Amino acid sequence: MNVSMRVSAVVVSLAFSTLAGGASAQDNVQKLMNMNTTGASLDVPTIQQTGPAADAIKHNLENIKLPPGFEIALYAIVPDARHMAVGPSTGVVFVGTRKTKIWSVTDRTKRRVADDVKQFSPSVAMKVPNGVCFSRDGMLYSVEHNRVMVYPAAEFFYEGPDVAAGIVVPQGELIPVKEESFNHGARTCRVGPDNKLYITLGNPFNVPPKDKLDLYAKTGMMGIIRMDVDGKNREVYAEGVRNSVGMDFNPKDKSLWFTDNQVDGMGDDIPPGELNRATEMGQYFGFPYYGGGKIRTAEYKNDEAPANAVFPQVDMDAHAADLGMTFYSGKMFPDKYQGGIFSAQHGSWNRTTPIGARVMFTSLKEDGTADKTEVFAEGWLTPNNEYLGRPVDVAVLPDGSLLVSDDYVGAIYRISYAGK
């Protein structure tokens, strides 16, 4: 099946399934699903890549410390840059935000720096399109606050305001509308080895009240859900997860790894942040009985914790805010990094002395479990506790270099290896 037939088939299929379900869509989305134009301006918003702002960011990158042989440079200025998805065919980078836009970042000349950054599909009204991910056949999925969209062949047809689009989960059906919250509403996604769509769903509370537990367990709001890529056969894959904002599959054993942000207000040094490993469906990862690691929460300390709780592979520093992660699949970096995990720490907001704002690396043992975790890139947090940046996500470019997004500065950095 050629690309155009594949696009049409997916869009038509999703259109019929959405209409059959009685869900309403944005007028423009419906037009796109019917392959109609929306009348949106052909003047797509773009972001200037040179000037004083770019110069200031480059200057601040001089503070970043990396292992010997590694270099960091500004790749692109991208406002509110959050999670990234690299096009499997072209290397075009799509960047989600916690606001109303997705950005496309194109290195047309392969100078390893963005030639242009423009808004993706501006004719679609979006709400917190934080999570973006690609399927192996080039479908771009966007997980919003309470909707899931798919954009077939996005990396080939992203230049104009209108793109092929489909609704995977209609507005208001990803989580119960009454549970929508400004807190913990940024989702992430991955298409797994089983070709199912996996989505992280945080709960709105620091620690939820007991009368919410059954609802959250049923909907997956304290966990990770999965579904067919057309939105059917939804199920809860992992439970007991407070607010994961980053996950990836180990290519070697197909296990799902994910970060988790843990309970606030328990002190500067507890509970730890988490890097977890799910080896099968149905595992329970401890929350809300455990606030992080094996630290019990005050709210549930007198309740019997589930005996089958799965504890983290890695206890990270408390409140460092572990977010995006990726398995390193490139060939540029030395053998030490092959098959390991890079993860981003956003930086603390409620710790007496701030911590985080760095990129971590975790190596794995032969049995697929975590081995050692160390700081890979740091310096965005100055000695006088000012943030020069706050890393959110990491992604691997086709050449094997590593991208790091930063929503504080509004930029993407590229880390390359030039050593021997």
Image: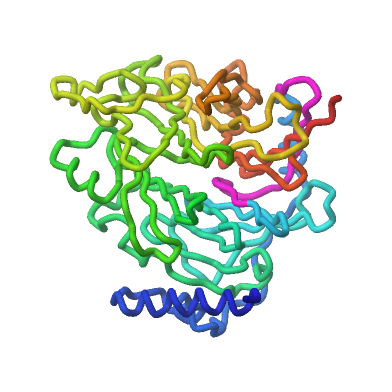
34 in magenta: no
Residue 298 occupies which quadrant of the picture?
top left
> Which quadrant of the view contains residue 30?
bottom left
- Which quadrant of the rendered structure holds the C terminus? top right
Q: Is residue 223 visible?
A: no
In the image, 247 versus 53, the foreground residue is 247
Measured from the top left, where is residue 206 in percent x and y?
29, 33
What kind of colouring is applied to the model shown?
A: rainbow
Pick whichever, 320 or 402, lies toward us.
402
Question: Residue 358 placed where, x, y %?
Answer: 59, 27
Q: Which residues are magenta?
A: 65-85
Residue sitting at x 78%, y 30% = 71
- Which residue is painted at 67% across and 42% down in the image? 396
Q: Residue 254 vs residue 94: left or right?
A: left
Left or right: residue 402 compared with residue 40: right
State which quarter of the image contains the N terminus: bottom right
Q: Position of residue 61 (x, y in %)?
A: 73, 31
The answer to whether residue 326 is above or below residue 39 is above
Q: Residue at image x 56%, y 28%?
A: 357
Location of residue 298 with respect to 224 vertically, above or below? above
Left or right placement of residue 117 versus residue 207 in this view: right
The answer to whether residue 61 of the structure is visible from this angle is yes
Magenta span includes 72 = yes
Q: How many marks?
A: 0
